Image (tube, helix red, strand yellow):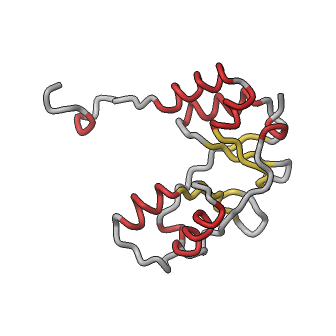
Amino acid sequence: MRCNEIMKAEIECVSPETSIREAARKLRDHRIGFLPVCDEAMRPVGTLTDRDIAIRAVAEEMPLEAPVEACMTWDVVSCSASDDIQEARDLMESYQVSRIICTGRQGRVEGIISLSDIVDVDEDSGAQTLRRVSQREVRGDSRFLSPGL
């Protein structure tokens, strides 16, 4: 099965210059938690989640009129809309993300696949992907260890 068969093609995007307030309203109004951040040609340059706004913008007391580029995630995890969904699963697991952007030949955003989309088409592999995405590795950084360990 190809990514374009399960991706959500009706998506909302913002630009890096969009205000945090406007992006938050878009998340609220469309009842979503994830927005691709795109350039003028609709190529992804980053992502913005409701968590990015809460953890980076609100916690750091950024003004709501600041651009989303101040709190967005600059790393883009994407695959081609024509890829097999296994590619999307592998990328989700490797980068431990629950959503992936699907692009077309010109690198433009064409859709988004979420973990729930994967589960909808294959419950067993979706559950396996969910387990792997949600794993958090501790790589010897004592900040992540409990005091008793």
Q: Is residue 47 above or below residue 113?
A: below
Q: Quadrant of residue 82?
A: top right
Residue that sits furthest to the top in the current view: 124
Q: How many marks?
A: 0
Residue 115 percent location from the top left of the image: 63, 36
Please tell me which residue is depicted at 60% across the width and 34% down the height of the picture: 92
Quadrant of the rendering where the C terminus is positioned: top left
Q: Is residue 20 above or below residue 109?
A: below
Residue 128 percent location from the top left of the image: 58, 22
Quadrant of the rendering where the N terminus is positioned: top right
Please tell me which residue is depicted at 56% across the width and 29% down the height of the picture: 130
Please tell me which residue is depicted at 77% across the width and 43% down the height of the picture: 7
Left or right: where does residue 53 sit relative to residue 125? left
Q: Quadrant of residue 87?
A: top right
Residue 124 percent location from the top left of the image: 65, 19
Viewer-proximal residue, 119 or 78?
Answer: 119
